[in-house]
Every structure is written in C-alpha cells, then in structure tokens.
Amino acid sequence: MRPLIYLQSRRTQLKRVIALSIPAILAEISSMVMQYIDAAMVGSLGANASASIGLVSTSTWLMGGLCISTATGYSVQAAHLIGASRESDARNVFRQGIITALCIGILLCLFGTSISHGLPRWLGGDPLIIADAESYFFIYACALPAVQMRQLAGSMLQCSGNMRTPSMLNAMMCGFDVIFNWLFIFPDHHLPFGLTIPGANMGVAGAALGTTLAEWVTAFLMMYAAAIRSDKLRLTSKGQWRPTRECSSRAARIAIPLAFEHTVLCGAQIASTKIVAPLGTISIAANSLAVTAESLCYMPGYGIASAATTLVGQSLGARDRDQAREFARLSVGLAVFLMTITAGLMFLLAPLVFRILTPDPAVQELGVHVLRIEAFAEPLFAVSIAAAGAMRGAGDTLVLSILNLASMWGVRITAAALLAPHLGLTGVWIAMCGELCIRGILFLIRHLRELGQLIHDGIRLRLHRLFEIAVHLLALDLR
C-alpha cells in the first residue's frame, strides 16, 4: 500500500505544480507575445530602429532585475508566513515592502534618467542609432517606480497562492502596450469608412512611451488587487508600516544576493552587447531580435519557477522540508520536459519567426542561424531556471548568485570576447549556448546534492525507527 500512497501523493503534488504553473506560463506567453509585437512594430521601421532598442535592452533588464530582487526579498517572507498560517504578519511584511519598494523605485528612476544620455555611447553604439537609444532608455527609466510596485504586488499575490490575478493583469499589460505603441509609434491611422485615429508618429520613443504607460496602468491595478481585493493580503486594517529591523534584515539577506545575481547576469549581458556593438547594425538587430525570439523556449521555465518559489516557500513555512524538496524536483523535471519541446519548435519555426519580426533579409538570415544554435542549450537552461525558482523559495539566493557569477563571467563573456572577432555574432551565440549548458550542469549538481541529502535523511529515519522497534521488542523480552 505504501508505494500506492506515495504515487498518489506524488501525483497530487505534480497537479499542484501544474495548477500554479499554468497561470504563470500564460503570463509568460502574454509577455512573449508583447515582445514579439513590439519587435515587429519597431522592426517595421527598419534595422536601425531595432538596433537602437537592442543596444540598451540589456540595461533595461538590469533595472527590471533590481526591481524583482526587492520584490522577492519581501514576497518570500510572505510565502513562509502564509504557509505557517500567520497572515497578519504577512500583511505587515507587505506594508513594509511597499515603503521600501517605492523608495527604491524612485532611486532607480533618478539613476536611470541621469545616465540615459551617455549610456549608448559607452556601449559603443553606431552614431545613427544613439539618439533613439537615448530617448528610449530615458522614457523607460521613468517607468521604474511602476515596474517596482507591479513586481512587488504581483510577487505577493503569487506567493499567497493567487497566480491567476497577476497572470491576467500581466496579459492585460501586453494589450495596453500594443494599443499604446500603435498610437505613439506610427502616424495617423486611416481606417475604413473614412475613420481616422490620430497617431503621434514618435517612432522608437513612441515604443518606450507605450511601454511606460502600460507599466503605470498595470501597477495601479496590481496594487489594487493585492492591497484591497486579496483575502490574505488586503491592507484595510491597522498594521505595521514602519520598517522593522527583523523584516528589513531578512529582506536584505534574500534581496542583496539576488540583486547581485541580476547585476552579474545583466552586467554580463551588457558586456556582451558591448562585444556585439562593433559587429555592426545588422548584428545588433539580429542579436536583439533573436533574444526576443528565444523567449518562445524559456517562457514555460520561468512560469514553473514562479510556482516553485511559491510551493517551496509555503512548504518551508509549514516546516515540511521533504515536501519542499519534492516540489523542487517535480518543478525541475516539468521544466526540462516542456522546454525541450519548445526548443524543438523554435528550431523548426525560426525562419517564420524572423519573417514576422523584421522585413530585413540580412537580419532574418543571421537571426535564424544564431537562434538555432541556442536551441541545443534549452533543456539544461530549464534546469537552472526551475532550480533557481525553488532556491528563491527557500531563501537560498547566495549560492544562486555565486553559480551565475562563475558561469556568466567565467564562461560566456570570456568565450564571446575570444570568438566574436573570428566568428562574428555566431561566435557570441556559441559562447552563450555553451555557458547555458555549463550553468545547467552546475544547478543540476546542486539539485542532485539536495536529492542525495533527502535520500540520506530518509535512510537515517528508517534506521532510527528500526532501532526503536528493536529496543521495544528487547524490552518486551526482558519483561
């Protein structure tokens, strides 16, 4: 009977992983669709427009990553408290997170706007694309307070077990972005029956403005859902708004290594951009669009990672370490399975994807070539994504940062710098593929060590029980 009970328990846990993953995966799909539509809209303006956004895209990812770090520092605490049925304490963590996130969002905004003028030049951009790149990054930086609050509220909802609401709102943000882009990027739109809808004809700056407005609208809706509508998080009653030392120190222990991780990853991507920039506008555009196209592969992984963070965090809050490890293993296995399928689809559909993203034949040809190289790394990339989500749920962000540091800077950047002068953009993507495989192996080793520890604990527990039984039988004999 015990194997049957174990299988039933495992099936139940897998259903929970899938149930929480599906809304998050749908959110990733909507985000991917938004990126594809954005890329197609801007790509229709020509290779220079795509290259101007691609030049600063890694810098925008860095800013967004720092926002995620702050949000995670508080949302993981909330997951542990909710798992322990301490919902009032979770609400206090949310309150303190709002104050901290608002301050950090404003500081990031001020920093981003102050460096926007010199950043494209420092990255080595072509003079033809520098002006557009400057305006895009400046406008995006104005959205950072909204990005920070949206990330905090969304993470809090996810860690409370509500994956549906943030997923729906993120999907709505994609819709807002498309509409705003349509209005701001292009000139007047002449529709049938003599109807004309005015357009701002702002080009690349219009794409940034559309994204910024979409972020602000979604941030207000996300905060309303978390602070007013959520049963577990609503802030309608009295509570602790002033940051406490205990909550702040716990948030710092989680967020600082995670911020370091994002800085390492995005810093390496910025360095990679600097390596790609001298290769010319075609390479910059193909690189940027290929990164967008690759999201077809890894969107299931990040959705599952969000579910893993919630399930592992709540299990540890309930002091059930075995269940937390089981959720981590199931999440990794599911991510590898799905991302292997999407990698195959990406390899087959790469030409069609690039025909959608850009009309430039040179960009299409180069983009398809490098994208197919990356497909071979996706299964191991899935391991690193899902395992990282589980580690965040456990609050184990320091090891995560160290592994990423060793992988990105020790492998990707070094190899890309050596290969780019000889193989061009192909060399950069070969380096990326190799690095993702090595990163996945590092996370797999870490994951298998956790599995080995679980097996060791199980054997030790059984031996302890056998010893107790033997002692009990011996006592009966002595009587």
Image (cartoon, rainbow, N blue to C red):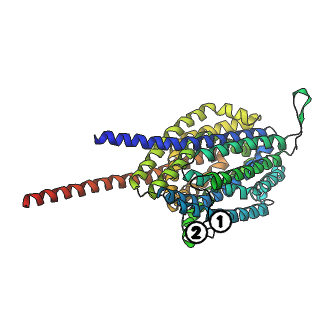
Q: Position of residue 287 (x, y in %)?
A: 69, 44
Left or right: 4, with 378 as reference point: left
Q: Amino acid at mark 2?
A: Ser
Tell me how far mark 1 sits from mark 2, CA to CA. Answer: 9 Å
Quadrant of image for the N terminus: top left
> Could you say which is closer to the camera, residue 56 or residue 71?
71
Mark number, residue 248: 2
Quadrant of image for the C terminus: bottom left
> Could you say which is closer to the camera, residue 162 or residue 194?
162
**Do the residues bearing badges 1 and 2 touch, measured as CB atoms within 8 Å?**
yes
Residue shown at 16% from the left, 58% from the top: 472
Left or right: 479, with 31 as reference point: left
Residue shown at 77% from the left, 35% from the top: 360
- Look at the image and tell me whether residue 278 can be seen: no
Q: Position of residue 321 (x, y in %)?
A: 40, 55
Left or right: 447, with 48 as reference point: left
Q: How crowded is the residue under tag 1: few (<14 C-alpha within 10 Å), some, or many (20+)? A: some
Give the answer, above or below, for where 344 lies relative to 447.
above
Residue shown at 67% from the left, 45% from the top: 169
Q: How many numbered marks, from 0 up?
A: 2
Helix, strand or loop under label 2:
helix
Helix, strand or loop under label 1:
helix
Left or right: 310, with 169 as reference point: left
User: Quadrant location of residue 67?
Assistant: bottom right
Q: Position of residue 248 (x, y in %)?
A: 58, 69
Q: Amino acid at mark 1?
A: Thr
Give the answer, above or below, for where 50 lies relative to 465.
above
Q: Residue furthest right?
A: 194
User: Quadrant location of residue 172?
Assistant: top right
Decide which of tag 1 and tag 2 comes sooner along the chain.
1
Residue assigned mark 1: 100
